[in-house]
Image (spheres, coloured by chain):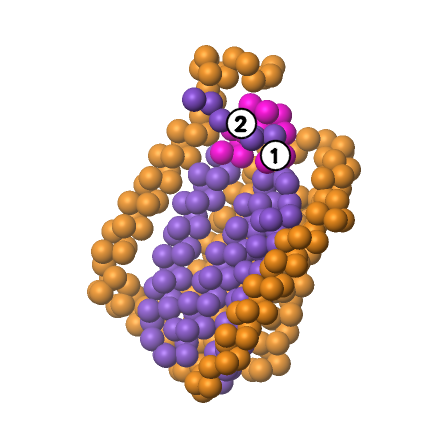
Amino acid sequence: MMTLFYISAAVALVSSVLAISRSNAVHALLYAIVSLLAVAMTFFILGAPFAAALEVVIYAGAIMVLFVFVVMMISSGPGAVQQERKWMDGRLWIGPSVLTIILVAELLSVMSASDVQMRSGPVVESKQVGITLLGPYMLGVELASLLLTAGLVGAYHIGKHTEKNPQTKDANHD
Amino acid sequence: MTNIPAEYGLVLAALLFATGLVGVLARRNIIFILLSIEIMLNAAGLAFISAGSRWGQADGQVMFIFILVMAAAEVSVGLAIVLQLFHRLKTVNSDEANTMRG
């Protein structure tokens, strides 16, 4: 079990780093899908099979498909990869990386400072998750449905073509 | 079945979150920024799952479901904004969208 955890954690980390550093968007998306699948494996090992299934179905299945659609719609020819590479100057990574390494060191020192013995417990079945979700968290479910409705309406409204809108007349559309 | 120290899950979550944070800060392509935000949200979910598994309670997975719903709503609106940006400015460089109207 421990070996499986290490392997999936390493795969998740490496594929995430590759996903944020590719210049081709489709390659980056494929690496991101591998990362999500590896995290789903981690969920399974940690005793959360329902969350693992949701991760595969919704994250790797639905959300990434949305990304693929958008990349297909705005793909701008063979020059895009060169342009992306030009945007990714080597020195650009230094500042964010240093700041983030400081943050990670802080987080790791906080975690290692606690002397609480933490072992993962038994498997939490989906029945228990469902009872908790529709019991004490009922209000949260209602709010989530409201949020999804707002997301649906918002995406439809923003995604509409507003060619006749006078606000866009100075944008150089064809 | 499971005997993983929950700290390991939290450490993995921290490292994944940091990876996504570097992506948000360093990339200019707005699609990659959204992708990095997805990685960060996923890492937050992993932290909840680790904590829930340490206590053997279902609350961690419930919170993960809420994060999932939030990520789905966020990515749909975000990608609509990306499409709108591309139609108006003919680029995916987020630095180009640096002026406000009004």
Callout 1: chain: B
Element assignment for label 1: helix
Q: Nearer the viewer, residue A144 or A123?
A: A144
Q: Which residue is pictured at 69% across the width and 51% down the height? A: A93
Q: Position of residue A13 (x, y in %)?
A: 63, 64
Query: What's the mark number on residue A130?
Result: none
In this rendering, is residue A125 above or below A84? below
In this rendering, is residue A89 above or below A173? below
Residue B41 seen anywhere in this rendered image of the structure: yes
Chain identifier, colour purple = B
Q: Nearer the viewer, residue B81 or A68?
A: B81
Q: Position of residue A114 (x, y in %)?
A: 47, 81
State the predominant SS element of the stretch in magenta.
helix
Callout 2: chain: B
Element assignment for label 2: loop
Mark 1 neighbour class, 10 Å CA radius: few under 14, some 14 to 19, many 20 or more: few
In this rendering, is residue A12 above or below A110? above
Chain identifier, colour orange = A
Q: CA distance from mark 1 to mark 2?
A: 9 Å
Q: Nearer the viewer, residue B60 or A125?
A: B60
State left or right for residue A168 relative to residue A74: left
Q: Position of residue A4 (x, y in %)?
A: 60, 77
Which span is picked out in magenta?
Answer: B81-95
Q: Circle 2 sits on which residue?
A: B99
Tell me, yes or no, whether dots 1 and 2 are on the same chain: yes
Q: Which residue is pictured at 38% across the width and 34% down the height? A: A154
In this rendering, is residue A94 above or below B63? above
Query: What's the mark number on residue B95?
Result: 1
- The magenta stretch spans residue B29: no
Residue B92 seen anywhere in this rendered image of the structure: no
